[in-house]
Amino acid sequence: MSLRICSAALLASLALAGSAQAQSQLPLESMQIRSLYRVPEPRDEFVRQCAPHMLGRWAHPEAVCGCLHDHAAATVDDPDLRQALLRGISETGVPTIETDWVPPSKQAEIGPTFTKIAKPTLQCMFEPISN
């Protein structure tokens, strides 16, 4: 009889230990699953796409791309034009907007958008990086 009680106690303690271990792993597993679905920050993704186009042209391609992103985001108010400009920079390494990337009603604003970003673009590309 005591053998049955000891066996039952041993099984119960193993079951509880296994349950506790499984519960302690759940937060870690859910964190791992969440990290799989983590969407990169838009600026980081932009720099990742832009930098290869800057290699060989600039000593610090990531800094140039980050600067271009920051100025485009701060200077261009219209979301369609801003998105088209960022797309052009990330795909080519230079400020570019294809007319089919913006609605027809905003295509007349492409020229003025380039005028707005001309000086900041030159600053990003030619002024030394301040540390």
Image (tube, grey):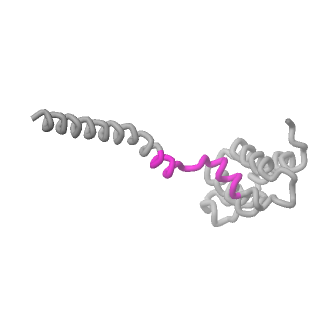
Please state the horizontal and vertical placement of residue 66, each as a whole percent of the image: 74, 47
Left of 51 or right of it: where is 33?
left
By secondary structure, the bulk of the magenta-drawn segment is best described as: helix
Q: Quadrant of the C terminus?
A: top right
Please tell me which residue is depicted at 86% across the width and 45% down the height of the picture.
123
In front of the other: 31 or 20: 20
In front of the other: 59 or 4: 4
In front of the other: 120 or 26: 26
Q: Quadrant of the N terminus?
A: top left
- The stretch in magenta equals 32-49
Indicate the quadrant where residue 6 lies.
top left
Please tell me which residue is depicted at 45% across the width and 49% down the height of the picture.
33
Please tell me which residue is depicted at 76% across the width and 49% down the height of the picture.
68
Indicate the quadrant where residue 48 lies.
bottom right
Would you say residue 105 sits in the magenta stretch?
Answer: no
Please state the horizontal and vertical placement of residue 36, each as a whole percent of the image: 50, 52
- Asked whether residue 94 appears in the rendered view, the answer is yes
Please tell me which residue is depicted at 90% across the width and 43% down the height of the picture.
128
Please state the horizontal and vertical placement of residue 31, each as a whole percent of the image: 46, 43
Left of 66 or right of it: where is 11?
left
In front of the other: 22 or 1: 1
- Asked whether residue 116 appears in the rendered view, the answer is no
Left of 127 or right of it: where is 109?
left
